[in-house]
Image: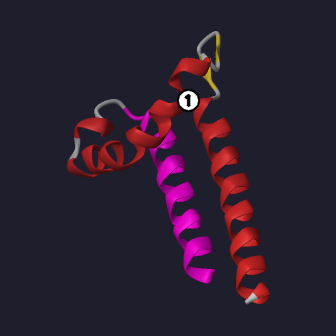
Amino acid sequence: MALISKAITIYTYVLVIYALLSWFPGAYDSKIGQFIIRISRPYLSMFDRLNLSVGPIDFTIIVAIFVLQLAGQGLILILARLIYMI
């Protein structure tokens, strides 16, 4: 369960870095930027159809991080109950 928690934490950091890269022109074009895009866009694309933009501000990443944390905690709780039930 610690591994799942650590993986969720690392992926949350990746999503935050993805958001921060938007502040720097050309950051997505770097090798690190391309790597971050490659691993974060599949997850973020699930939230694209929700239209979470208000003016120039996009709340997609905030909602995605919230859902990731919530789902991760739910998964850990389910696994803990399954392990202790056996």
Q: Which of the pair 4/80 is nearer the observer? A: 80
| Residue under the image location 63 percent in, 47 percent down | 65
Write down the residue under mark 1: 47
| Residue under the image location 49 percent in, 36 percent down | 44
Q: Is residue 14 magenta?
A: yes
- The quarter of the picture where the C terminus appears is bottom right
Identify whether 59 is placed above or below 33. above
Q: Main secondary structure of the magenta part?
A: helix
Q: Which of the pair 46/60 is nearer the observer? A: 46
| Residue under the image location 58 percent in, 37 percent down | 61
Which range is magenta? 1-24
Identify whether 71 is placed above or below 34. below
Q: Is residue 37 left or right of residue 67?
A: left
The secondary structure type at the circle numbered 1 is helix
Coloured how? secondary structure
- The quarter of the picture where the N terminus appears is bottom right
Q: Is residue 70 magenta?
A: no
| Residue under the image location 77 percent in, 88 percent down | 84
Q: Is residue 70 left or right of residue 31?
A: right
Q: Position of residue 83 (x, y in %)?
A: 70, 85
